[in-house]
Amino acid sequence: MKPVVVSECAELHKIVHSLHLQDLRVGLVPTMGALHDGHLSLVRESLKQSDFTIVSIFVNPTQFAPGEDFDKYPRTLQSDLELLETVNEKENIFVFAPTAGEMYPKNFDTFVEVGGPSKPLEGTFRPTHFRGVATVVLKLFNMTQADVAFFGQKDFQQVQVIRQFVRDLNVPIKIKMCPIRREEDGLAMSSRNRYLSPDARQRALCLSRSLRHAETLIQAGCRDRAVIEAEIRAILEHPQHKIDYIAIVNPDTLLPEEAENGNTGNVGNAENGNALNASISPTFTLPVAILLAVRVDDTRLIDNIVVGE
Ligand code: AMP
């Protein structure tokens, strides 16, 4: 069965209210649509852990800066519903597909500003991005009244930002992070992969390859930030690639560890003049997160790995 599609918040409230009256647990999987198996892995996890699953599909304008791909972002509701049909055996999936007017009515003027984990990395390159993400995600939490929400490690920094505001604002919801789903050749699944030409698609494998190589080095005992970063950079470099960042950071703070006794390294985001470089430790401890953002031709791809958890 194709899932039931709800577009109005009031209707959604009624449905969730009646589910909660029956003591049923509601899971939420927020997405921007153009669904692929990565999204479905979150839906499957929600189906395992909850009685009903709401999949939201909304291309959120406030998380795109002018000049980003909001207009060309794929909108494929019919095929999204067909994909969801394949996991809706128990008919316990709802799709919440609000209009922009439902999410951001006239005179809307309140935003969620998260500090800490929203500041480095994506925060440097897309300064208004997490404000838009946090705002829409908090609205979705409130609109769906879900008990638990599922997010992908693919957007590792996003999960840390959401955890931060859920803690800070006492939002009554559990946050679950699910592993990155990859194509057989290692490319992290992403709605943006469809922008890649066949040649760029092949070159895009450098992200996952460089992360696997870094993992191997770390497992062999290497803790030298400069060595790992240089090895990753060598794999990513190509005249048609632009490396936004290679970050080797603490998974909780998303910051590199600080040097003790003035013993400093000068790596990481050096190209961006990150002031933190002055006190970055030349080595790191486990667990460590390595996050990448690379433009392959015109398509900005992100990927990450956490080692030693
Ligand atoms: P998006 O539609 O890109 O906003 O993604 C919606 C959710 O799906 C986010 O929590 C993403 O982290 C998650 N997601 C996207 N790609 C993947 C993937 N390859 N594996 C696991 N989760 C993913």
Image (cartoon, rainbow, N blue to C red):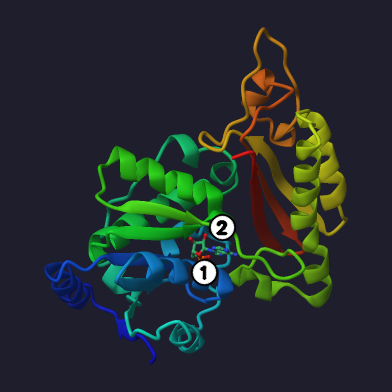
- Near mark 1 (Cα within 10 A), the count class, few <14, some 14-19 or many ≥20, is some
Ligand 1 within 8 angstroms of badge 1 C-beta: yes
Q: Is residue 191 above or below residue 119?
A: below
* Residue at horizontal 57 percent and vertical 74 percent from the top: 37
Q: Position of residue 119 (x, y in %)?
A: 51, 38
- Tell me the amino acid under the disc marked 1: Ser
Would you place residue 142 above or below residue 215 in this image? Answer: below
Rendering coords of residue 25 (x, y %): 25, 65
The residue shown at (75%, 44%) is 215
Front-lying residue, 77 or 308? 308
- Residue furthest to the left: 21
Q: CA distance from mark 1 to mark 2?
A: 9 Å
- Per the rendering, the mark at residue 179 is 2
For the C terminus, which image quadrant? top right
273, above or below 179, in the image: above
Q: Is residue 41 visible?
A: yes
Say whether disc 1 or disc 2 marks the residue closer to the N-terminus: 1
Q: Is residue 105 left or right of residue 84?
A: left
Question: What secondary structure is marked by label 2?
Answer: loop
The image quadrant where one finds the N terminus is bottom left
For the residue carrying disc 2, how many other residues have a C-alpha within 10 Å: few (<14), some (14-19), or many (20+)?
some
Residue at 81% in and 39% down: 217
Q: Which mark is residue 41?
A: 1
Residue lying at the far top in this picture: please name it.
Answer: 261
- Where's residue 12, x and y in %? 22, 74
**Residue 71: x %, y % from top left:** 53, 73
